[in-house]
């Protein structure tokens, strides 16, 4: 009886899958953390064992503590980070989403990230990006939507 009850408590404690609106809010919070120079706020949106990759091995970070340091750690990064989302899409069934973005710090990048959500947080982050001096509108000018 105690085993069955423990199983039910585990099921009840598991967070519900994210909705599309919650996914959008989660990624907006990541951007807000980066834009404020708040590495803790951003890192806390990732699972403890999150994997962050720019393939094939340009950037790879494993775990929330490594991401906290990558995002600037205890001191605000200089120059400041600036993240802007242009398009977000999310499949609620698979808990996998995509974001098209512009990120600027030491350089400007336009890119796409594929994100997998686990237990309401980002468990996997895989980004593909291009360095560019162009603003977003000029970067996509031939196919802007």
Image (cartoon, rainbow, N blue to C red):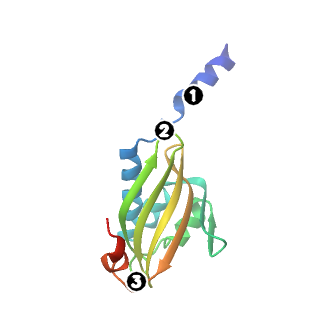
**Left or right: 102 in relation to 48:** left
Q: Name the residue under label 2.
A: 17
**Left or right: 99 in relation to 117:** left
**Quadrant of the rendered image containing residue 10:** top right
Q: Which of marks 3 and 2 is nearer the N terminus?
A: 2
**Quadrant of the rendered image containing residue 36:** bottom left
* Residue 114 versus residue 139 in the image, above or below: above
Residue 107 in percent (x, y) is at 44, 84
* Residue 53 versus residue 104 in the image, above or below: above
Frontmost of labels 3 and 2 is 2
**Left or right: 113 in relation to 53:** left
* Residue 9 versus residue 109 in the image, above or below: above
Count of numbered circles in the view? 3
Question: Looking at the image, can residue 93 be seen?
Answer: yes
Frontmost of labels 2 and 1 is 2
Question: Which of the pair 2/53 is nearer the observer?
Answer: 53
Disc 1 on helix, strand or loop?
A: helix
Residue 79 in percent (x, y) is at 40, 83
Disc 2 on helix, strand or loop?
A: loop
Mark 3, other Cα within 10 Å: few <14 / some 14–19 / many ≥20: few
Q: Which of marks 1 and 3 is nearer the N terminus?
A: 1
Disc 3 on helix, strand or loop?
A: loop
Q: Mark 3 points at which residue?
A: 79
Question: Which of the pair 116/8 is nearer the observer?
Answer: 116
């Amino acid at each position: 009886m105690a085993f069955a009850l423990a199983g039910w408590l585990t099921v009840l404690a598991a967070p519900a899958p994210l909705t599309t609106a919650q996914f959008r809010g989660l990624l907006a919070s990541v951007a807000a953390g980066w834009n404020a120079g708040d590495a803790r706020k951003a890192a806390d949106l990732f699972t403890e064992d999150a994997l962050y990759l720019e393939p094939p091995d340009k950037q790879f970070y494993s775990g929330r503590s490594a991401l906290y340091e990558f995002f600037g750690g205890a001191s605000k990064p200089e120059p400041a980070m600036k993240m802007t989302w242009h398009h977000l899409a999310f499949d609620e069934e698979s808990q996998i989403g995509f974001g098209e973005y512009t990120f600027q710090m030491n350089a400007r990048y336009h890119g796409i990230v594929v994100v997998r959500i686990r237990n309401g947080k980002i468990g996997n982050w895989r980004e593909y990006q291009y360095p560019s001096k162009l603003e977003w509108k000029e970067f996509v000018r031939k196919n802007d939507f």
